[in-house]
Image: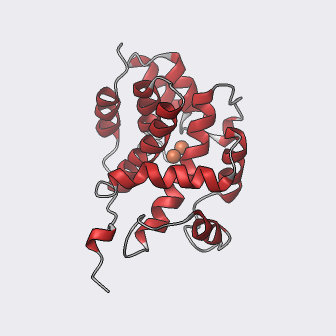
């Protein structure tokens, strides 16, 4: 099959109805897509993988099924092994090697995209003007976006060989263009001072 983000979106939305999960998929897609573009990788394939990484979470919300049972569905649908294996590798409990740039990037963007998204939601200007410094400060507040695994955020940056600041900056920049789809305000929405 030809791997396109449109086809991935079609598969994703067939299994996922929750707005929060769709927004998570879009945020991870934007981040992974920006890394694909900057390193000259197959952007459609990387975007499709990011969109699909949690596609089965709504039907398989427990770790005895997600994402491993989802992988079977993807294979039946004809998704290439490169996509399926990357989807499988995002799950910490499967302890699979992250031995390709796609696998490393997906892992590195999964938790951080959610965290940066959460940071944007509590700011009147959304992601506009958000600095890595304040994201790092919030990472140290355990009650803020408590579901985000901090250790995976730090491990992700390390896996990409990037300073955490740079990785955060990249993710912020990747999410900014899709702020409306993520339900985020922008500087244009903020009341004049
Ligand atoms: Fe997941
Ligand atoms: Fe995820």
| Residue 64 in view (yes/no) | no
Looking at the image, which is closer to me, 191 or 19?
191
Of the four image quadrants, the one with ligand 1 is: top right
Snapshot quadrant of residue 51: top left
Residue furthest to the top: 1
Q: Position of residue 132 (x, y in %)?
A: 58, 63
Snapshot quadrant of residue 39: top right
- 53 shown above or below 170: above
- 40 shown above or below 30: above
- Residue positioned 42% across, 19% down in the render: 79
Snapshot quadrant of residue 168: bottom right
- 103 shown above or below 121: above
Q: Position of residue 29 (x, y in %)?
A: 43, 41
- Residue positioned 68% across, 30% down in the render: 98
| Residue 92 in view (yes/no) | yes
Quarter in which the N terminus is drawn? top left
Colouring chosen for the image of the structure: secondary structure
150 lies left or right of 41:
right
Q: Position of residue 55 (x, y in %)?
A: 42, 38
- Residue positioned 67% across, 54% down in the render: 164
**Badge count:** 0
Q: Position of residue 33 (x, y in %)?
A: 45, 36
Quarter in which the C terminus is drawn? bottom left
Looking at the image, which is closer to me, 17 or 45?
45
- Residue positioned 69% across, 50% down in the render: 163
Looking at the image, which is closer to me, 121 or 148?
121
Residue furthest to the front: 193
């Amino acid at each position: 099959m030809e791997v396109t983000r449109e086809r991935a979106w079609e598969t994703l939305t067939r299994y996922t109805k929750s707005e929060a999960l769709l927004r998570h998929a879009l945020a991870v897609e934007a981040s992974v897509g920006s890394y694909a573009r900057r390193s000259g990788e197959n952007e459609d394939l990387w975007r499709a993988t990011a969109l699909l990484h949690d596609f089965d979470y709504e039907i398989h919300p427990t770790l005895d099924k997600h994402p491993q049972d989802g992988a079977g569905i993807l294979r039946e649908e004809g998704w290439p092994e490169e996509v399926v294996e990357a989807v499988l590798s995002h799950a910490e409990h499967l302890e699979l090697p992250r031995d390709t740039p796609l696998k490393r990037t997906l892992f590195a963007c999964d938790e951080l995209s959610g965290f940066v998204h959460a940071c944007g939601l509590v700011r009147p200007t959304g992601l506009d003007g958000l600095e890595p410094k304040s994201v790092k400060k919030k990472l140290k507040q355990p009650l803020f976006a408590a579901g985000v695994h901090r250790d995976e955020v730090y491990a992700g940056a390390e896996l990409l060989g990037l300073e955490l600041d740079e990785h955060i900056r990249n993710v912020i920049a990747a999410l900014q263009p899709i702020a409306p789809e993520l339900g985020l305000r922008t500087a244009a929405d903020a009341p004049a001072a």
